[in-house]
Structure formats: structure tokens, C-alpha cells
Image (cartoon, rainbow, N blue to C red):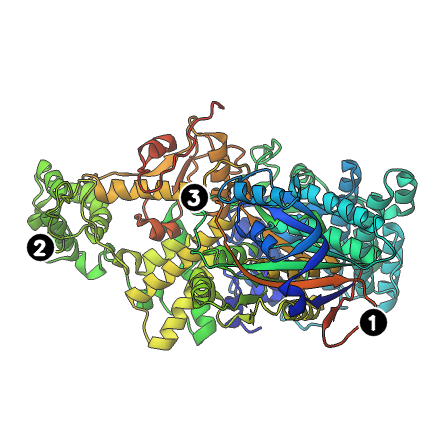
Amino acid sequence: MDGSRVFEVYNARNLMPEEVAKTFVPPPVFDRLARRRNALVIGPRGSGKTTLLKMLQQPALECWENPSANEFRARVDYTAIFVPTDVVWSLQLQSFGAQIEDAGTRQLLGRSAFTTHVLRSVISAFVDRTDCDMTPRSHHHRRVPLTPEAEADIVREVSSVWLCRPRIATLRSLRETLSERLSDLARVANREARLGELGRHERLTDSGYVDLSFLPAARAAVEIFESVSGGSGHWAFLFDELEIAPSWIRDDLLMLLRSTDQKFIFKLSLSPFTVGLPKHDGAEQHDYDEIVLWYPLKEDGYHFSEALWKAMTKARYGEAIDPATLLGHPPYATQANEWAAEGTAYLPNSTVAEAFQSLATDDGSFREFLSNRTIDPSFLQEVSKDDRAKLLRKIAPLVYFRREFLASRAEAPQPSKRKGHRRSQRPGDPRAVLRTRKNATVYSGVEAVFAACEGNPRVLINVIDRLLNDYDSFGEVTEASQARVLRSAARAYSALLRTAPVPGTGGFGLFRLLRKIGRFVFNEVVRAPFNPDPPTTFVVDSDISSEVEEALGVAVNMGAIVYLPDKDAELVLKSLRSKRFRLSYLLALNFTNPMRIGRPISLSEILRRSSSDDEGDQLPIHFGDT
Amino acid sequence: MMITELPAVDLREPKFDLFIATLGYEERSSSILGHVTSERGVALGFPHNHELSFAANRKRFAECGYEEVVVEDEQAESIVRDRLRDLVEGRRNGAALRVGIDISSMTRRRMAFVLSAAIEAVTQFDLQVDLLYQLAEFSSPLRDEASNVHIGPVVPELAGWFDRPDLPLSLILGVGFEVGAALGAREFLDPDHLWIFEPESITAQYADAVREANLDLWAVATGQAEVFRYSIFRPLEIVGVLQNLVDKVLERSRVVLLPFGPKIFSAACILTGLQRSGVSVWRVSTGPLASPTERIGSGKLVGLRLQRQTVRSADSDVGFRPDKSW
């Protein structure tokens, strides 16, 4: 798969390490992850956890061409063992042996399946280390030459410890034998379901491998490998997507983060919120690094997004293209030529000034706001420099946004002559006439496109790929095209959110909850009287029921809401209470929200004030539990 | 076990020794009684959603002398197994036994349990099980706002088991007019490869509704997914195409079947999954929170026949290659 087409695959899970490396753009946190230390990578779906882990693997490091690649190849002085997983495998593991009545036996066989899967990954790492794999690579990383005889010695000794018998004494054959063991486990499970408890202990003892544990088994294998090959060093287990692993696997692996094992380090990935997570305070005690893969502030994700854009354009066209060249800027990002030392940006015919004047014309509440501060929208340049910095610059994006969605007097339809059906034309009135914007300009431009993607590689690659397709087809990427692509991405994302299962049966939909929040923000920003600091973030307060909290937990793991931690706050969440969040900016398109962080408000207040006349539903705020 | 298509003559006035119907809220769950005759009947009911046509259905089943058994889905398997065993034990003089099962109003979960019992009986005893599906009159799809409580294997036995968890994932997706549901499932599973089974319909309304409900899926999948269009009036062809595709794809990837749309396609997926341990069959469900939607029977029936494999007929059957013994 060449470098340009690999961007068509949006999930690193589906790519070989070499393919991941071809397009890898290292985020700032990769430096910390690469260290020879235990680490917990935390991020919502699509934030790049799998990509980062896969990049630590030898095949990826060997193929990676990047100015910093050599430095990382030197820094990664261990061999990574990546243990793949996905939701299908995880559910199979949880369903494994479902017809066996005894829970202990089910878990024993499930653990054995997991152990077998891990040991298979260990052999894959051995294969990568040695010359057994003939794939030519640009740079060798921790390779050890291995003669066929030495390979046979390793295989025989490891097989003895692991209680298996490969057909031939090669690493690949040993790996295949472990696949057969997984099939055999299914047969064992069927047998135990059929035969019941009588004689079970003897039968399982005969299948001795069911008692193997992955860590001592892997340690023995690694020692054999190093003894025969002459290599030595550290090894790192990379366990991905722990949030979908059965709890009995997840909790055991999380405990390993506190490990001071001399041979193995552990790097795990996890979503931000996990119910029933055991207490872990190792990060505070510096046992491991916590590495966060989301960006509370949209500005923090810009650099990475730009780097990914340039990598993709380089792969497609042979040269990196500045994203602003194709996407332009949103209207609220004042152009450089409009800024000058003495406030040129606020002259009457500037973009900013026109926006202020336009809104002041149509919006009485905004007019009143300016008047109370003795600001004349026609003479913004006369406002003091201090006030321009503190106030005007701060509210300018809100002004643009509000103006975009409030209809002008000329556009507003005449009040209905029917009695009792008068329509208000006063903005600031909840019945204010709104403008339908299919291609809202506030959602176009490089800043808006990158903000909507939240620095999430999966979304970014999808969106950028489609924008570049438009560029290839039409020679430009119009505002309408950008809005269309983002809306499509938002719809696909919404479909995903509607599908994600929410534990319990609260009688409401996750998406309905998010929509309530989104509509509240829209009302505050557009419908309500102009507010220079409208609430656009929320705190999960104690009046929220546990069912709503669980639904929000799904939302944060899917990236639908973004955690805004205080300094030194915990990053892996066992509870959402008292935590502050904002809606994902991708959902901003669905709910017509601005992409900005405003002051917080309690979620229960949002739910109390949210309009229900078009939905006829009420969300449970408080069920008496605390 | 052999699967054949119910011939037209058997669909005009099917006659059974035992008919297993569904007691639910859809009108078609009892309207099928106007098209079948049976010595005995069992109406398997659900313990919830007793609204819409439920009361009328219950009355009709009672008037026809049907045994009403209200159970949770997981109990349906043992009920069906017991009734089939009773039927076989009561057989006189080695007479051929014919059983009918109406799958039209079953949940996919219940269907999995019932078909599991049916397959077991067919392979153990000399009896014939006809799966009947009654097409519903078109009604506009409703967008269900309730959250999903389950997305995963239909039942644990259909979770499948892969000996190569590192292989790519292939999703075979059946679409219906559940708005956005297929797209959401595709986004959730994020497969390497995608195949879409789209139902043709005798009504333009239904075809348009399916297209409309899946517009965003087509936008995402165009150029990336292969689409098979199937007719619900050729159910054996559905099974054949599906199983040939599954067998081919299994050679190089893991396979998940996720059927939205007509229940006859769901039945084909479940039959496939029950016969191949390497295949996982999934469902998406809002559980008891699902908004009940009326479905009026059209009187148009299609069906599949399950019977013990004797002599294989190359033209009319689909031979299984089971990898587990029944």
C-alpha cells in the first residue's frame, strides 16, 4: 500500500506497523511515550492511541522516514510486543464458554485464550527481531542474526515451557501452533459445557496449558531467546484498548503499571472514563507516565493537525501544501493585512468593524451592550487599546457567529396576521427569527476545520482526504465544500454516537442528551440577549443521576464531550462528578455551536432550562442517588 | 442439514403438524393464521410491549386453540426444543412430520434461540422445519431515539471464535430502513472490508425508504464496499450468496454479519453463523426501550425449509459445510 492510499484507511488497527510508519506524524507526546518507562496512554476513540503504540514496534521504527526518526530509533532501546485487540475480539473473549455454568471455569478458559494471544504476539516480536523475516527495511533496529539451528533451539525450548508442539522447529510454525491452541480452546469450552463439572479438574489438568500465565511464560521465552541469540535488553508489552477488555484482564494489566520488573515495561492504552477502575495512584508516585491524547484547547491541536495535513499533501502531491492556501481562514480570523500597530483592524471598513456594525443594526441587545460601554460600532478604532484587547477581540468570534445565524430585518418574514401567531423580530427573544445556514462560513477555514477535527488523527485523515479529493476534482476547496465535508463527518460521527451502547436503561438516548446541551449553548449564544461570556461548558454536578453520568462516560470515551481538567487533576476518570466538559467541536456543526470555551454551568441547570416542547421528554436529573 | 426454498405450492396453503407463531404487537404475527393450517400451535409471546395489536393477536391465537407461552428470549430455545421432542415422540407409524415457524415478528435474539433448537431437532430427528416470513405492508420508518443497550453478538453462541484475532475484520452488513443504523454500526466496528446487502422490494416506497435511510452510508461506502442486492422472494439465493461470500472471506479475515432490514436476511445470517464457528453474528438493540411499530401483514409469504441432509440436489439446495457436528 503506497503512502497516499494508506491515508484512506482511517484506523491504525487495520494497518501493519510498516504502513503506520509511512505516514506517521509524531505528536509532542510521542517523546514521552518512547521512554523506557511504564506508560498509560489516555484518549478517546480515534485519538491515535493505537498508532502511537504501533510506532514503537520494530518494523515501524525501521520503516519510518522522518527528521526525528533516527533519534527515536536510538531512544527506543527495548523491543515492543504489541498485543492487538478490538471490540470483536474483546466480546468474543467475554462470550467465550458462555454455556459453561461455572464462572470460574469460564474465566480460566478466557484467561488461557488471552495468554495464548499474548504469547503469539511475543513470537511475532521474535520474528521481527531476527532475520527470519525477509522483508527489506530501510533501517535495522535491534536486529539479531539467527541461524536456522539457533532458531530451532529457541523453538524447542520455548515449546517445552509453553507445552506445545509445533510441526517444525521454526518461529512461524510455533506461532501457527498457538493459533491452533486458540481453536483447541474453543473445543475444550464446548466439551466442558457438554460434560459438566464431573471430572472437569482432571480434564483441564490434562490440557496443562490452561494454567499458563502470560508474564512468567513470556519471561521464560525471552530469556531463552536472549540466551540463544546473544541479544539482551528490555522488552515492552503494549496493550491496546483496555477499556474494551474484560475487567479481569484490564485490572490485572493496570496493576502492572506499578511494576518495577527488570525485564519488562508496560505501556497500556485506555479511554478517559472507565467504570469500576481499581484505584491507581502510580502516576502521582511517578511509577509511570500518563500521556493524554486530547486537546482541551483547540489551539493546542493546531500544530499536530497542520503537520498531518502537510504529510498528507506531500504523500499525495510530492510537496507539502500550507493548509491556509487551500482552506483559507474563517471570517473571525482577521487577516494579517488588517492588523497594524495602531488598530487598523478596527477601521470602519475592516472585516471586524463590518461584523460589529451589521449585528448592531439587527440585534437590539447587542446595540444595548455596546451602548452601555459607550462603544460606537462605527468607530471601533476609537476604543482604547486595552479595551480592544480585553473586550473586542474576545467577543469578535461571538459577534460573527451570532450575526451568521440571526436573520436581518430585511430577511425576516412579516409577522403572521393570524391571531396569536405573531413572530418576534427582536433578537434576544427566544422566538427570534433565525437564519438557516447550510454552508455557514464560521465553519470553514483552516482554524475551523482543524478545530472540528479535535486533533483526532482518525477524523483528520478522513476529512483531509475528502477535502483533497475535492481539490483534485475542482481545483479548489470552497467554503461550501468544507462545510459539506465537515457536515458529512459530523453526521457519520452522530450515527456512531447513536449506535454506541449505553449501559442501563435510562429511557433516554445519549444523542438526545448531547442535543439538549447543544441546543442550550445555541440558545445562549444566538437566541438569548447578547452575552459577552455565554456558558458553553458544563460541570457534572451532584444533581445528575448515575444513569446520565454513565451515558456521559460513553460520550467522553467516544470523544463526544471533551474533558477540561484543572491543573493536577486526575486524567483517568472513575467519576465524572464535579468535572468540567465541553461538547466536541465536530458536534458543533450538528448543534450550531461556536467552537470556543466559555464559562461553565451545571449540567442539571442546562437540563432544567432546556426546551422540551419539541421533544416531549425529560431527562432524569436526580434519582435520589448521590 | 439441508436448506431448500419453500415451493410455491407449499406456500399457498401450508399445512403443519405443529406451528410455532410469535405473539407480539405486530398485526402480522397473528394474521399469518389466515394462511396456514396446523394440528397444533404454540404462540411464543414476549413479556413486554403489550400494545398495538398485542391484545387482538392474543385473542386470535386463543380462538385458534394455540398454546400461549410468554417467555424471555433465552427461554424460547428450550420451549421449542421440548415441543419438537413431544411432537416426535408422539409420532404415529413413522409419519413424516412438518413444523412451521413464523420468524416475521421475532427479535433477532429470539430467532437465534429458536433456530438453534430447530437445527438441533432437524439433525437429530426425521422432521422438516419450514421457516416462514410474511412481508409487511409498507409503513414509514420511525427514528427510534432510545439509546442502544446492546451492540454485539446476537447471543453468546453467535460470538464466533477466531484463531487469528490479528486478521483484518470484514463486515457483511444488511441494510434496512432504520435511519442511520447501518452507518453507525459500520462506524462502530470500523472494518477493513465491507459488504452491503440491500433488499430489493416490490414497492418503490420501500426501496426509496431504504436508500434514504442509508444516504450517509452510501456516501462513505461508495467505492469501498461491494453491494449485493437481494430479493426477499428468493430466500435460498440469499442464503447461497451469503454463505459463498462468507466462506471466501473467511480464508483471509475475520467475519462479522450484522443484519438490519428484512427478517429473512437475518435468518440467513443466523443460519450461517450457527453452522460456522468462525463467523460472528451481531445485532444492535434498544432492548425493551424500542418504540413498537405496527407492521400489517401483506399475505405474501416466503420460506426456507430445513431438513436432514439425504441426497444432495445441486440445483435447489444449499449444502452446508459444518465445522461442528450436530
User: What x and y, as percent, mark residue A390?
Assistant: 21, 41
Q: Give a yes or no on whether discs 2 and 3 share a subunit.
A: yes
Q: Give a yes or no on whether discs 2 and 1 share a subunit.
A: no
Left or right of residue A205, residue B191 in this image:
left
User: What x and y, as percent, mark residue A244?
Assistant: 61, 46
Q: Quadrant of the N terminus of chain A?
A: bottom right
Q: Nearer the viewer, mark 2 or mark 3?
A: 3
Q: Residue at x 54, y 71 (%)?
A: B227
- Mark 2 / mark 3, whichever is N-terminal: 2
Q: Nearer the viewer, mark 1 or mark 3?
A: 1
> SS for tag 2?
loop
User: What x and y, as percent, mark residue A565?
Assistant: 44, 37
Q: Nearer the viewer, mark 2 or mark 1?
A: 1
**Residue tagged 2:** A348
| A25 is higher (above) or lower (below) than A432 | below
Amino acid tagged 1: Val
Left or right of residue A73, residue A24 in this image:
left
Q: CA distance from mark 1 to mark 3?
A: 60 Å
Q: Is residue A538 visible?
A: yes
Amino acid tagged 3: Ile
**Residue tagged 3:** A561
Of the pair A282 and A360, the residue shown nearer to us:
A360
> Mark 1 belongs to which subunit?
B
> SS for tag 1?
loop
> Mark 2 belongs to which subunit?
A
Of the pair A75 and B318, the residue shown nearer to us:
B318
| A39 is higher (above) or lower (below) than A175 | above
**Residue tagged 1:** B311
